[in-house]
Each structure stands twice: as structure tokens, then as C-alpha cells.
Image (spheres, grey):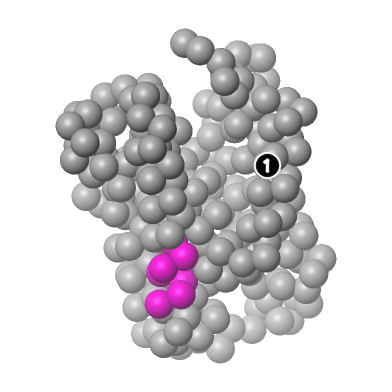
Amino acid sequence: MISDLTTWQITLPIALAAAVIGYLLGSIPFGLLLTRAAGLGDVRSIGSGNIGATNVLRTGNKKLAAATLLLDALKASAAAWIVGYFFGYEAALIAGFFAFIGHLFPVWIGFKGGKGVATYIGTLLGVAPLMVLAFAAIWLAVAFITRYSSLSALVAMLVIPVALWILGAEKVAAVMAVMTVISYWKHKENIARLMRGAESKIGAKG
């Protein structure tokens, strides 16, 4: 398994092209664009200040939040699908990873983006689509038990790389594991609130 993980067939020019395409697609700030187009101002001025679907939901517009979630996921999927079609699976992995990075650190708005859950799911959809069902099942189970959206995502992102590794998908497991670590860092404030018991629960007001 380790030998497969450390043996990549992709050439450096193709890897760089995949990274650039993925980053540019991932850095499209749909949350910001959609809220501005809807006349709701700059989503970065409310709530957590990020551009993800959770913060868009704080505008009170559920449809806009759902559209943000969908587009943030699909930009990572599209990066993996497009690059993978032309250059193969390893290139798709790289494109999906850098779409995730682009969402977290978009060059267009000062490298201050979202927390990566939607683009994490979108990357999974692009490179290991059946695992999206596993992610959803884990998220729903944890959410049902705890009522914490952030904890549900954190648990799902922890389990997915392990499951992929057990199933023999070493390369995608390694990529998703790195994404998990980065997303945990972006969720550090949520984690701190969870530890204090101060994190907002699903459906909580205020």
C-alpha cells in the first residue's frame, strides 16, 4: 500500500496545470457573489465573516445558502472532472485538492475564504463519489445525536480518509487526510467552542 502511495505517474507540467486550474475554480467566491447579486451586501460583514454557506444562511435567505453550498461543492467537483477527463485520475486528485485550497484562500478577496466543508464534499464527489454517501450518513448520524453541524462535519472528515485507506484507495485517502487537517485548522474556533460547550446547535436562534 505504501509503495502505491509514494508512486505517482503524473508529470510535473500536468501536475502544475491541474493545480492552477483547480485553484482558479476553487477560488470563485460564490457566497460573496450571490449575496451581492441578491442585494444583501457583503456577507463578510456578518456572522463569522467568511464566504461559506453557513454564513450566507445568516442573511436569512435559505435558498441562497443552499445555492452557495451547491456551487462551492460543484466547483471542486468540476475541477476534478475536467482535469481528470484530460489528464487522468492523479491530476483529478491534484485539481480537487487545489480547488479546496482556492476556496479557503481565494486570491481575489485577500486569501480569506470559507472553511472548506462544501469543497471537501465536492472533491469527494469528483474523485470518490460513493464516499459522499458515507459522508452524508456520518454527518446525519452525528447531527441527529448531538445537534452540532460543525461537529458532524468534523467527524465525517475524520472518518472518510480512514475509510478510504481501509478500502485500498491510498492516494485519495492521503489527499483527503491532508484536507481534513487543513479544515480542522480552519475550524479551530468551532472546536474551541465545542470544547467549552458554547457552539450553536442546529436550529438554535440568535
- Residue lying at the far top in this picture: please name it: 206
In the depicted view, which residue is nearer to us: 206 or 103?
A: 206
Residue beneath label 1, please? 139
- The amino acid marked with disc number 1 is Trp
The residue located at (23%, 44%) in the rendering is 33
In the depicted view, which residue is nearer to us: 186 or 30?
A: 30
Q: Where is 4 relative to 31, above or below? A: below
Q: Where is 44 relative to 98, above or below? A: above
Please provide percent x and percent y for residue 21: 33, 71
Tell whether position 78 is magenta: yes
Q: Secondary structure at mark 1?
A: helix
Please provide percent x and percent y for residue 32: 26, 40
> Toward which corner of the image does residue 194 lie, by quadrant?
top right
Left or right, 92 with reference to 71: right
Q: Residues within 10 Å of mark 1 (few under 14, many from 20)?
A: many
Q: Is residue 47 visible?
A: yes
> Toward which corner of the image does residue 112 lie, by quadrant?
top left
- Residue lying at the far front in this picture: please name it: 63
Magenta span: helix, strand or loop, mainly?
helix
The residue located at (71%, 81%) in the rendering is 4
Please provide percent x and percent y for residue 83: 41, 78
Q: Is residue 49 visible?
A: no
In the depicted view, which residue is nearer to us: 156 or 58?
A: 58
Q: Quadrant of the N terminus?
A: bottom right
Bounds of the magenta span?
Answer: 76-82
Please provide percent x and percent y for residue 120: 53, 54
In the depicted view, which residue is nearer to us: 59 or 62?
A: 62
The residue located at (66%, 49%) in the rendering is 136
Q: Where is 27 relative to 51, above or below? A: below
Tell whether position 206 is magenta: no
Left or right, 103 with reference to 144: left
